[in-house]
Image (tube, helix red, strand yellow):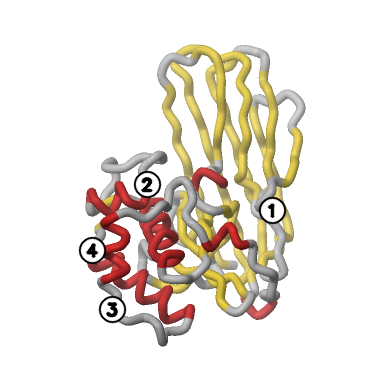
Amino acid sequence: MKHIRFFYSMKIDFSFPVIRHCFSLRCLPFDTPSQRIELINVDIEPHNMLTETTDGFGNRVLTDRIIEPHSKFIAIVEGKASIDFSKREKEELNCIYKYPSQHTAPGEKINELVSGLGDISNLTMLETAQAVSKRIGEVFSYKSGVTNINTTAEEALHLGCGVCQDYAHIFLSAARLSGVPARYVAGIQKGTGETHAWAEFYDDGIWVGIDPTNHRMCDETYLALSHGRDFADCGINRGLFIGGGTQTQSIVATVEEI
C-alpha cells in the first residue's frame, strides 16, 4: 500500500472575457477497491452551480454553466489517497474494451507493429501486454508538439513520435488487435509535474496498469482520474464558451508519496 498526496491545478487565461461558459471536468479521482480517496478539496473559480455526476465509465464529472463574463478560469483539486493493489477485485469485462474505438482503429502501421511481435499465441495476457509495450518503444519515440488531442493511434505511429496520449492509444490498438482487452487511463504519476496517460489491460478479471510511455508496469503511485475506451471518453477538461479571443492554459499535477 502507498499513501500519497495529490495536487491538480488548471488555469486558463482568456485575452478577452468569455460568457456562457459550459464545462465538464474529470479531475476528481474516484474510489475503487484499490484506490481510496481519503481527503479531497476542490476549488473551481468562477462557478455558478457546480453539479457532480458519474458518467457511464464510472468517472466523476463536474459540470457548470457560467453566464457572467470572466477572463480567468481556475480548477484546483488536492487531497490524499491510499492505493493498494492487493485489494483489486475481479469484475466482469465490458466487451467495449475488446474492440477498436474512435482513436484506436488499427490500420497498416498498427498491423505491422503487431506482426512484429511474432508468434504470441502461447503468451499470457501479461506477457502479451509487455511485448506490445516493448515493441512500441522500439518503433516510437517521445516528442511533444507533433500530435494533438485528435491524433489517432494509426496517425501517430505513422509519424513515429508523440506524447503519452499517443503511446496509450497505440498500445490500446495493438493490444486489442492481439486479443487483450484494454482501456485508456488519464491521471497523475509521481514526479511528473503534469497529467499523464497510460493503459490498463484485463487479465483474469483484474485491470492491470501498464505505462507504455515509460515501458513499465504501473505501481501504487499512479493516481487515476478518469478512464474509458480512449481519450475521447475521458478528457480531463472540456468546455464551450462565447468570446475569449486567445487563451493560455497551464497545468500542474503532482503525486507525492507520504
Tell which tag, 3 or 4, sits nearer the viewer. Answer: 3
Name the residue that disc number 2 marks: 152
Identify which amino acid the numbered label 4 is placed on.
Answer: Val
User: Residues at badges 4 and 1 in contact (C-beta under 8 Å)?
Assistant: no
User: Residues at badges 2 and 1 in contact (C-beta under 8 Å)?
Assistant: no
- The residue at 36%/69% (across/down) is 133
107 and 29: which one is in front?
107
Q: Is residue 220 above or below residue 30?
A: below
Provide residue 96's location: percent of width, then percent of height. 58, 57
93 and 236: which one is in front?
93
Give the secondary structure at mark 1. Answer: loop
216 and 118: which one is in front?
118
Give the secondary structure at mark 2. Answer: loop
Name the residue that disc number 1 marks: 58
Query: How far, Cα to Cα, is label 4 from label 1?
Result: 34 Å
Give the secondary structure at mark 3. Answer: loop
Going from N to C along the chain, the mark reached first, 3 or 4, is: 3
- Which disc number belongs to residue 25? none
Query: How far, Cα to Cα, is label 3 from label 2?
Result: 24 Å
Identify which amino acid the numbered label 3 is placed on.
Answer: Gly
Tell which tag, 4 or 2, sits nearer the viewer. Answer: 2
Going from N to C along the chain, the mark reached first, 4 or 2, is: 4
